[in-house]
Amino acid sequence: MVQIQTDYSNLTRERNELNNSYNILAEEQDQLQKRFEEMNNERKDFQRMIQDKCHCGCWRSFGSKYYYISSEQKTWEESTEDCRQKGTDLVIINSEEEQQFLIDLNKRVWIGLTDQEKEGVWKWVDGTALSTRNWLPSQPDNYREEDCAEMKVNVHRSFLKWNDIPCSQNNYWVCETVDV
């Protein structure tokens, strides 16, 4: 009889501990759900803001990102600054799909690639080293102090479209948002 009483007391204690754990987990789940909803609403607000700007025809979505395609031409530095003022940066090409998206714009644009820091060492504007290479044949050639990269159009049907040109040249540009 004493053993039954002890077992009953132990089971009651374990049940109470499990109930406490359940209540704590339920509260954490509620907090996580609220935070998820807040973040989802922030994402929707950002998307609405971008869509409002799309009426001017300058923002386009692709995948989980938005891209600003300029309608005027500036130097690479001026283009970089314009992107930063928008809270973005010049486009960093991370996939074949993104490369094709930019090709499909059919517009000669700056991309966020430069070797200004050290000649021949190409880096993206976020400081990452170049891993994918989509240079036109015989590019980069640094023909005239060419330290900035552009995406050319109307040159053969190849996937290879990058070209190095002087950063002081005027060009259209593409800014890229972070994942939303």
Image (spheres, rainbow, N blue to C red):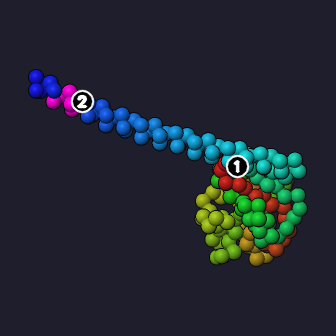
Please give the count of numbered marks on the rendered protein.
2
The answer to whether residue 168 is left or right of residue 20 is: right
- Give the residue at x 73% y 72%: 147
- Give the residue at x 79% y 76%: 144
- Give the residue at x 36% y 38%: 20
The answer to whether residue 97 is left or right of residue 68 is: left
> Up-down: is 66 above or below 166?
above
In the rendered image, residue 61, in percent from the top left (x then y), is placed at 76, 46
Let me know if residue 130 appears in the view: yes
The residue pinned by badge 1 equals: 65
Q: Quadrant of the N terminus?
A: top left
Residue flagged by tag 1: what amino acid is it?
Answer: Lys
Quadrant hosting residue 142? bottom right
Residue flagged by tag 2: what amino acid is it?
Answer: Leu
> What range is drawn magenta here?
6-11
> Up-down: is 61 above or below 68?
above
**Frontmost residue, 77 versus 13:** 13
**Frontmost residue, 113 versus 135:** 113
- Give the residue at x 31% y 37%: 17
The residue pinned by badge 2 equals: 11
